[in-house]
Image (cartoon, coloured by chain):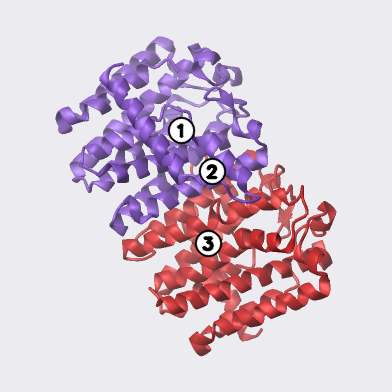
Chain colours: A red, B purple
């Protein structure tokens, strides 16, 4: 296992432990809710966003216990969005990370509530004193995450995505959609460390520039997997976009050009990290990993 | 119109204006989401929780612009919970505040996303500097609202409520369920003013004691309306609890004793306000209103 794989594994283990501590357990008649929240969050996923938080925070010397809480908050939001997006009324998916989706494993009502609970917990985690001693920093994290996740970010992006099933989007619209749907949370993941570490504006901006290119490259790679991957390897249903006749980077650019564009974006993302020198190598590696991955 | 009715009307108008300013509008392909969020929030409801926030804040001399933002945040959470609770997979209600519920007016996917967007916006509103100049106060508001609304508060209470359709609860269980499902958000509504105004512990506690009794009295009154009210007056479907064979304060205590218990709780709630003197009269009036209301 290379140094990058080891770092990714270590980061995933750190966030898994944090999530396990933060998620509620036991409980009375609501125990089923707690189980569903844990099911949807623990034991799966590449934990790319937590890796961004942890590596971003490392650039500014943020204590790992603080960074792990912010990383857990981002992953809670990501997992809530998967639970809701998988619902029958939305993308109607039965498979996620190689396992039954939350509403299949439990039921629709429980899945809706589990998503609500995960989203709410993310803000509870950020606002708690254990995340940062200064209230202003905690409030800035909450504000940035809420903007990234809300109606003008991730939730709005999902709405655009549903609208995209009824109308063929142009490339500029697909880019906007993906910036909202996945880019905003990537950006917050990179920004969290800068907020926790009270980074200078220039460094904060450099991380956001990296995040923006990374987010689009990630989405192009996702479109390529949907077009070319197999369900067994990817761990979720594939070929959906073509089936729905949805415009994607692949349908608009073609496979070869989409792949080229992803690599161009990764190069630019990596060059945004120059300001940090050697210390940002794990973030550079992550960008390369994102377009090379097969699942 | 008496002084209390005028105060309730004025408070509802203030929160309506704040919500209108805070909710997103226009937008591109996600415009449908914004419309659904506005539909679910604006132009309806008694705005009891915002009234609690505004009157609680007045006790501590909190500027009205700050209090109105906290009041809007609470109402956003309340409205999100109604949108999700009304979904077919949950309570499956078609009527709310005398109008089609959000998923009937739009569709299920849009209603799920609108709820998600409203919940997220509530935290964005609280974390913004306009709500309070001190970050620690803003973070304390976020933390308290997240706890009240989350898996160990409102969302957990809704899970218990769904479980209650499969098993007859005892009185102590119904009380616990209602403390989670409606009590926690009432408590936060009263607490918000104390947090904004940095109230002394004794006064903070007095407001929470008032809120706890008020919350239960409110729920008993709701059960009485469900048992005795008419859909046309109440503005939503009635007789549901009996139809589902669910244990409620009314089924467990009987109509007469439930009414007596509600009045006893209101008296105790009002006596918790003694520490504030005359200034708390609107909160005392609200408690009396809650059990006297017919809708």
Residue most extreme to the front? B26
Marks 1 and 3, how far apart in space? 29 Å
Label 2: few (<14), some (14–19) or many (≥20) C-alpha neighbours in 10 Å = some
Q: Are marks 1 and 3 in contact (CB under 8 Å)?
A: no
Image spot of residue B115 (x, y percent) = 55, 42
Find numbered disc 3 in the image and state the secondary structure of the residue it sits on: helix
User: Residue B148 appears at what percent x and percent y?
Assistant: 41, 43
| Residue under pointer 2 | A31
Question: What residue is drawn where x is 50% and y is 41%?
Answer: B155
CA–CA distance between discs 1 and 2? Answer: 13 Å
Is B170 rendered above or below residue B151? above
Q: Are marks 1 and 2 in contact (CB under 8 Å)?
A: no
Q: Which residue is drawn at 63% across and 55% down?
A: A157
Residue at x 54%, y 45% (from the top left corner): B25
For residue A139, side relative to residue B274 (left or right): right
Q: Are marks 2 and 3 in contact (CB under 8 Å)?
A: no
The label on residue A74 is 3
Report how far apart the C-alphas of labels 2 and 3 lie in the structure. 24 Å
Q: Which of marks 2 and 3 is in front?
A: 3
A189, above or below A152, in the image: below
Would you call the spot at circle 1 few (<14 residues within 10 Å), some (14-19), or many (20 or more)? many
């Amino acid at each position: 296992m290379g140094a990058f794989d080891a770092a990714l594994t270590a980061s995933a283990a750190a966030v898994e432990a944090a999530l396990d501590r933060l998620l509620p357990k036991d409980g009375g008649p609501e125990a089923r809710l707690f189980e569903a929240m844990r099911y949807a969050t623990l034991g799966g996923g590449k934990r790319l966003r937590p890796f961004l938080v942890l590596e971003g925070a490392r650039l500014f010397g943020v204590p790992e216990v603080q960074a792990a809480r912010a990383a857990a908050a981002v992953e809670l939001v990501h997992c809530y969005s998967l639970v809701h997006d998988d619902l029958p009324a939305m993308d109607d998916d039965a498979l996620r990370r190689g396992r039954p989706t939350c509403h299949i494993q439990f039921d629709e009502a429980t899945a809706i509530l589990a998503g609500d609970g995960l989203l709410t917990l993310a803000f509870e985690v950020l606002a708690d004193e254990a995340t940062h001693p200064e209230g202003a920093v905690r409030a800035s994290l909450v504000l940035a995450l809420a903007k990234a996740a809300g109606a003008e970010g991730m939730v709005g992006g999902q709405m655009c995505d549903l609208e995209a099933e009824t109308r063929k989007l142009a490339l500029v619209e697909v880019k906007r959609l993906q910036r909202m749907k996945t880019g905003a949370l990537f950006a917050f993941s990179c920004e969290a460390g800068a907020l926790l570490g009270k980074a200078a504006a220039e460094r904060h901006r450099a991380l956001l520039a990296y995040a923006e290119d990374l987010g689009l490259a990630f989405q192009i790679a996702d479109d390529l997997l949907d077009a070319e991957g197999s369900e067994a390897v990817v761990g979720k249903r594939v070929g959906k976009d073509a089936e729905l006749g949805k415009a994607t980077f692949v349908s608009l650019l073609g496979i070869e050009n989409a792949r080229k564009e992803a690599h161009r974006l990764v190069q630019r993302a990596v060059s945004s990290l120059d300001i940090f020198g050697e210390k940002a190598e794990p973030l550079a590696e992550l960008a390369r990993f994102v377009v090379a991955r097969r699942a």
